[in-house]
Amino acid sequence: MATALSLAFHPLLVPSYLFYAVCYQLPGVVAQPALSDRWIVLAVVFGFTFLLPALGTGALYWFGRLDSLLLRERAQRPLPLLFAAISFAGATYLLRQPPFALLLGTMMLGMTLAVLLTLLISLRWKISAHGVGVGGSFALFLLLHLTDVAGWASFWWLLAAAFLALAVVSARLALDAHTPAQAWAGLGLGISVVMSLVLGVAFL
């Protein structure tokens, strides 16, 4: 169960889940593009936040720069995270162009910042990238619920995000992939990035 949770909610898959929920499951949150064209958003997100980073990590493994695709050792993480940060930044650039809604570009910007911070911290300490992903997801649904732009639909997504955040962090601990400090720090970082980004946008 712990392995299945870790794979299903891998940090590279979480962005696709979030954009699907925002584009298709939360009415009134996204105005542009039109519903019939939102597959483009998902294609961009899936391609730049999963396919390209996964291919990059695979290439690093193929050429002997990584000992394992699981990246259990801290020293193995900087290059894949750097590749992911560049790819996430590409998605951010695309989604901040018209006609995409401001929320979509802002979400992608937050994810890019989270990857960059995870990279910088990982140079010295093995923070949980899974924790960062589910922490950011929880914070996003919390903000959407508090702003009441999606009505009660956001409440159920918030409950699901809270449950999954705890489940995924527990799974990482059960697999001995992280210490409790690393797992909870990842969760806190994900939440903090979203909250800080929203405060920054509001201030501007």
Image (cartoon, rainbow, N blue to C red):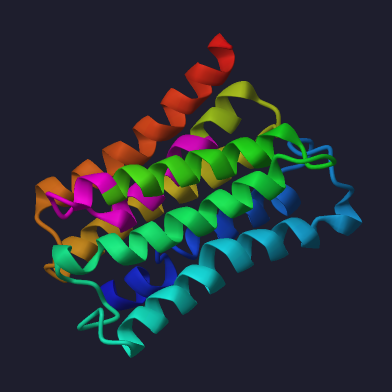
Examine the rendering and report whether any part of residue 25 can be seen: yes
- Seen from the viewer's position, the closer of residues 159 and 202 is 202
Residue under the image location 76 percent in, 37 percent down: 101
As drawn, is 182 to the left or to the right of 82?
A: left
- The answer to whether residue 166 is above or below residue 53 is above
- Spot occupied by residue 48 in the image (x, y as percentages of width and height): 58, 63
Q: Report the predominant secondary structure element of the magenta stretch.
A: helix
- How many marks the image carries: the answer is 0
As drawn, is 100 to the left or to the right of 178?
A: right
Queried whether the magenta region covers residue 121, the answer comes back as yes
Residue under the image location 39 percent in, 55 percent down: 164
Q: Quadrant of residue 104?
A: top right
- The answer to whether residue 18 is above or below residue 159 is below
- Spot occupied by residue 182 in the image (x, y as percentages of width and height): 15, 50
Q: Which residue is at the far bottom?
A: 62
- Report the magenta residues as a range: 120-141
- The answer to whether residue 52 is above or below residue 28 is below
Q: Quadrant of the N terminus?
A: bottom left
- The answer to whether residue 114 is above or below residue 82 is above
- Seen from the viewer's position, the closer of residues 141 and 15 is 15
- Spot occupied by residue 132 in the image (x, y as percentages of width and height): 34, 48
- Seen from the viewer's position, the closer of residues 151 and 23 is 23
Residue under the image location 56 percent in, 46 percent down: 157
Residue under the image location 15 percent in, 65 percent down: 75
- Spot occupied by residue 18 in the image (x, y as percentages of width and height): 57, 52
Q: Quadrant of the C terminus?
A: top right
Q: Quadrant of residue 113?
A: top left
